[in-house]
Image: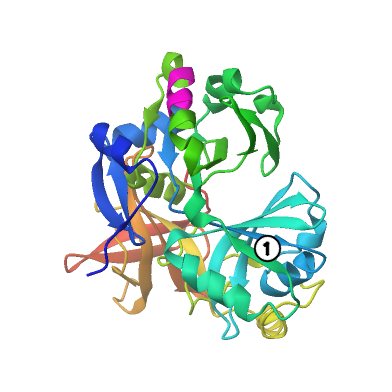
């Protein structure tokens, strides 16, 4: 049995009474109070996730952009300094190695932010394809990441920095002083769809910054938030979770990632993806809403009115905002139009649901 990795502030989460679980090889806080309370806190106010388990790679030098253009689906040439891009790493079999964020830090320096469960896999994949001589550094184990999310995030954090947080555009970042620590990355990104910021902090300053965030946020009712609410928040927005909705076997075009697949350049497996796009994909990732009462979960079968198997739920839960079961599933094209009736098999019963346009909230 492998020992679980711990984030820098593991001791603080225990002090805060978090329920800890195994996630992506780390021992992580899944909740502090209840998933529903934490979810609503982020949708309506402000909450903080410690997502320091995420991975960060620096790619530098005059070949940095060339390497990124080769391994990443999106067009990083369009990035200016201070801009962030969502993308994925295609594999050579037509699937997805991982989805990630690409930051342009400087003329010849980029940061890639990858999923915790894929840190080693992604590093090895990029390194294997780095026949260009770009300089790569894995800073994952020295870096903490705090996601301050919710409609009150900018107001709650403004006292900690001279950057005008409310003026920051989505998917941009600033390198600035924050909570008395110089040169931190303050990024207007997040995985909740509720607005807010992600702060990249060296582990040595993590506790100082975390405590400052909670001090500044006290008048706004700030709370720590666990991975349970992170999952329901991202699901309400229809965001993919690697390992559930996308993986090594998933066609990114079926997953709705065509918008970050740029064919104005060559990248790994681009020719095959271009052909697939031209031919049209046989199935697509859709969102559905339960009509009958029931909570869909990952791997539950999806069937039609006659009970014929169509696919399975990739992610599902009760939506705390809508108070109804919601989910994502890959279905044949004939069943992907909004308002199409489908059935989710829950405990041997076929419960009615309908296809809806994403996001749910």
Q: Which residue is mark 1?
A: 260
Q: Position of residue 5 (x, y in %)?
A: 34, 57
* Left or right of 47, for residue 254: right
Identify whether 223 is placed above or below 190.
above
Residue bounds of the magenta highlight: 211-216
* Quadrant into which the N terminus falls: bottom left
Which secondary structure, mark 1?
Answer: helix
Q: Position of residue 334 (x, y in %)?
A: 51, 74
Identify whether 134 is placed above or below 50.
below
Q: Residue at x 56, y 86 (%)?
A: 93
Which residue in the rendered view is the most extreme toward the front? 204
* Left or right of 32, for residue 328: right
Which image quadrant for residue 65?
bottom right
* Left or right of 18, for residue 339: right
Which residue in the rendered view is the most extreme toward the left? 347
Q: How many marks?
A: 1
Q: Residue at x 38, y 60 (%)?
A: 315
Q: Position of residue 269 (x, y in %)?
A: 67, 82
Q: Is residue 214 magenta?
A: yes
Most foreground residue, 117 or 85: 117
Q: Is residue 12 magenta?
A: no
């Amino acid at each position: 049995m492998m020992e679980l990795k711990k984030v820098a502030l593991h001791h603080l989460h225990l002090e805060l009474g978090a329920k800890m679980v195994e996630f992506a090889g780390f021992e992580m806080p899944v909740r502090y109070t209840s998933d529903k309370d934490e979810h609503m806190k982020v949708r309506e106010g402000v909450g903080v996730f410690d997502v320091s388990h995420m991975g960060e790679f620096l790619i530098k030098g005059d070949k940095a952009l060339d390497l990124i253009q080769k391994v990443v689906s999106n067009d990083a040439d369009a990035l200016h300094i201070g801009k962030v891009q969502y993308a994925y790493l295609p594999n050579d079999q037509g699937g997805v190695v991982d989805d990630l964020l690409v930051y342009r830090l400087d003329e010849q320096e980029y940061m890639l932010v990858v999923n915790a469960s894929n840190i080693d896999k992604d590093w090895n994949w990029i390194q294997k394809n780095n026949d260009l001589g770009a300089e790569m550094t894995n800073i994952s184990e020295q870096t903490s990441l705090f996601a301050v999310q919710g409609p009150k995030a900018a107001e709650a954090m403004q006292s900690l920095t001279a950057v005008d947080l409310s003026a920051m555009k989505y998917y941009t970042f600033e390198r600035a002083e924050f909570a008395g620590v110089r040169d931190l990355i303050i990024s207007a990104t997040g995985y909740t769809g509720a607005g807010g910021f992600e702060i990249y902090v060296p582990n040595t300053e993590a506790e100082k910054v975390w405590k400052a965030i909670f001090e500044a946020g006290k008048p706004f009712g700030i709370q720590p938030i666990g991975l349970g609410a992170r999952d329901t928040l991202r699901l309400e927005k229809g965001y993919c979770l690697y390992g559930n909705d996308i993986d090594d076997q998933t066609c990114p075009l079926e997953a709705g990632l065509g918008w970050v697949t740029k064919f104005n350049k060559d990248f790994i497996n681009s020719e095959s993806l271009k052909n697939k796009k031209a031919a049209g994909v046989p199935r697509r990732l859709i969102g559905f809403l339960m009509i009958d009462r029931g909570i869909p979960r990952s791997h539950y079968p999806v069937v039609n009115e006659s009970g014929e198997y169509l696919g399975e739920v990739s992610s599902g839960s009760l939506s705390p905002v809508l108070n109804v079961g919601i989910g994502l599933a890959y279905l044949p094209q004939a069943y992907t139009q909004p308002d199409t009736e489908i059935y989710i098999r829950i405990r041997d019963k076929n419960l009615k649901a309908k296809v809806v346009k994403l996001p749910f909230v």
